[in-house]
Amino acid sequence: MKKRLLLLLLLPLLSCEFSVDSFFSGGRPPSDAPVYVPVYGDAESLLKIGKQPPRAIERPAKIFTYGKYLIVNIRDEGFHVIDNEDPSRPNNLFFVEVPGNNDVAIKNGVIYADNYRDIVAFTITSGGEIVVEERLENVIEANSFPPFLNVYFECPDPAKGLVIDWVLGNVDDPKCYR
């Protein structure tokens, strides 16, 4: 009885066709396989942080309180600093440009933001100025593969700069797979 039940459960699996991906068998990827290529940016300019005039809030992510201020994170761009002393009339003071920023956190009066591979600690003075208190360099792993699984891609070359994005492209013989 148990053997028959086991056979019935395994029968659908036996009717499946198994194949080995050509990448793993030493061959080339199929010609129609999407191949991602890295987009590079200059590390020096991408790691610069700057205070910008206020601008419209588009695509907000997280919102935090920081004393009388609201901190509104904008993914990949930075964060807004809004004076919320009078909640009925919030005042968008300025934008802090932090390229590659994905997240912001606040603890013990310090704003922490990622800046590609670094973590930067900020404070805001009583006069409303932003101060970079500290930068921890190379804390976050580099963007060395596309954010997708089961794809072929051109292996990144750190000599070309920071990988800031991945796009579909043409690569004759990609060496990397994820």
Image: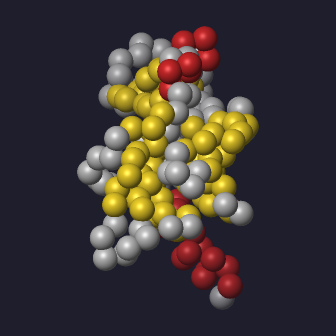
Q: Residue 40 versus residue 6: which sits nearer the camera?
A: 40
Residue 153 seen in render: no
Residue situated furthest bottom in the rendering: 1
Q: Residue 29 versus residue 37: which sits nearer the camera?
A: 37
State the image quarter where residue 85 is shown.
bottom left
Answer above or below: position of 63 versus 16. below
Q: Residue 33 versus residue 67: which sits nearer the camera?
A: 67
Answer above or below: position of 75 versus 89. above
Q: Position of residue 83 (x, y in %)?
A: 42, 62
Q: Position of residue 138 (x, y in %)?
A: 71, 32
Question: Looking at the rendering, in which quadrant would you find the C terminus?
Answer: top right
Residue situated furthest front in the rendering: 127
* Residue pictured at 34% horizontal, 60% vertical: 91
Q: Residue 142 versus residue 128: which sits nearer the camera?
A: 128
Q: Position of residue 147 (x, y in %)?
A: 49, 42
**Circle count:** 0
Residue 45 seen in render: yes
Answer above or below: position of 165 versus 173. below
Q: Is residue 28 left or right of residue 95?
A: right
State the image quarter where residue 86 is shown.
bottom left
State the image quarter where residue 66 is shown.
bottom right
* Residue pictured at 54% horizontal, 12% vertical: 160
Q: Position of residue 20 (x, y in %)?
A: 54, 37
Question: Looking at the rendering, in which quadrant would you find the N terminus?
Answer: bottom right
* Residue pictured at 38% horizontal, 52% vertical: 93
* Residue pictured at 63% horizontal, 35% vertical: 117
